[in-house]
Image: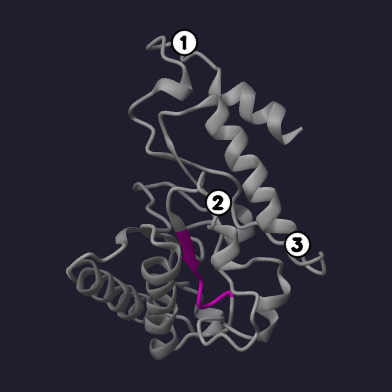
Amino acid sequence: WYKDLVKTILTRENTINGRLYSEDPTIMAWDLLNEPRCDGCPEGTVSNWFNEMAEYVKSLDTNHMVTTGEEGMYADPANPGNPGPWAAKEGQDFIADHSSPDIDFSTMHSWIDNWNTVNEDFQRKFLQTRIDDSTNVLKKPVILEEWGKWVNETAGSTQAEREQYMGIVFEEVKTLMSQPNSPLQGSMFWQWYLDGQEAAPTEGGGGGLY
């Protein structure tokens, strides 16, 4: 089913400009799956899936980069870059999942509220561990592909706190990207609303959590 979906997308012709998606230069890269998890699965289940599907995408599209789309958890529960021991049980393994030669860069998503780790030291450590591993082990670029900070008055998460933590991340990203040969190539916060646009009901409508 997944391969059928991929083939349908990559071979689709854009009815406006006549381009196949596999040949469209305005597309930067393909995420294989958004935040895949496999709680309780045998070791290697997720990384093996990534290896197979990355190779399949590249067999149909040699023009675009491919990456995982994962949060970047570690399989080792003692890894200081994990938001807690639970993260090691989610089936992800940042190193193994990005090791395929068909994976062009690594990804990380940072959601400190979701993980109950609203802590400045952890936020910096989260970025640094994955940057270090992308540099020294994977030898690939890395993107902070998705991140943000709740505004939830009920939970005591305020706009001021959002601005504080977003400032921390932007400052850290700028510093890390300015280092010679840094693998960090950018960040994409979640998310931007136009005036009048509202969040989904699951996020409370209005400005939403994010």
Kind of element beneath mark 1: loop
Residue 87 in percent (x, y) is at 65, 77
| Residue 207 is at least partly visible in this image | no
Residue 59 as seen in the image, left or right of residue 17? right
Q: Amino acid at mark 1?
A: Thr
Residue 207 higher or lower than 8, as above or below: below
The residue shown at (67%, 86%) is 85
Colour convention of the picture: one colour
- Residue type at mark 3 is Cys
Q: Which of pointers 3 and 2 lies earlier in the amino acid sequence?
A: 3
Query: Around disc 2, counting alpha carbons within 10 Å, would you say few (fewer than 14), some (14 to 19), or many (20 or more)?
Result: some
Assign a secondary structure to mark 2.
Answer: loop
Q: What span is colored magenta in the figure? A: 107-114
Q: Position of residue 54 (x, y in %)?
A: 58, 42
Residue shown at the point (56%, 28%) measured from the top left: 59
- The first of marks 2 and 1 along the sequence is 1
> Is residue 148 inside the magenta stretch?
no
Q: How would you rate the neighbour count of disc 3 (Cα within 10 Å): few for under 14, some for 14-19, many for 20 or more?
A: few
Q: Which mark is residue 65?
A: none
Residue 180 or residue 11, whichever sits in front: 180
Marker disc for residue 100: 2
Position of 110 with respect to 202 (left or right) is: left
Percent x, y of residue 38 = 75, 62
Q: Which residue is mark 1?
A: 15
How would you rate the neighbour count of disc 1 (Cα within 10 Å): few for under 14, some for 14-19, many for 20 or more?
A: few
Pick the front one: 4 or 139: 139
User: Distance of mark 3 from mark 2, alpha carbons?
Assistant: 19 Å
Residue labelled with disc 3: 38
| Horizontal relation, residue 99 to residue 4: left or right | left
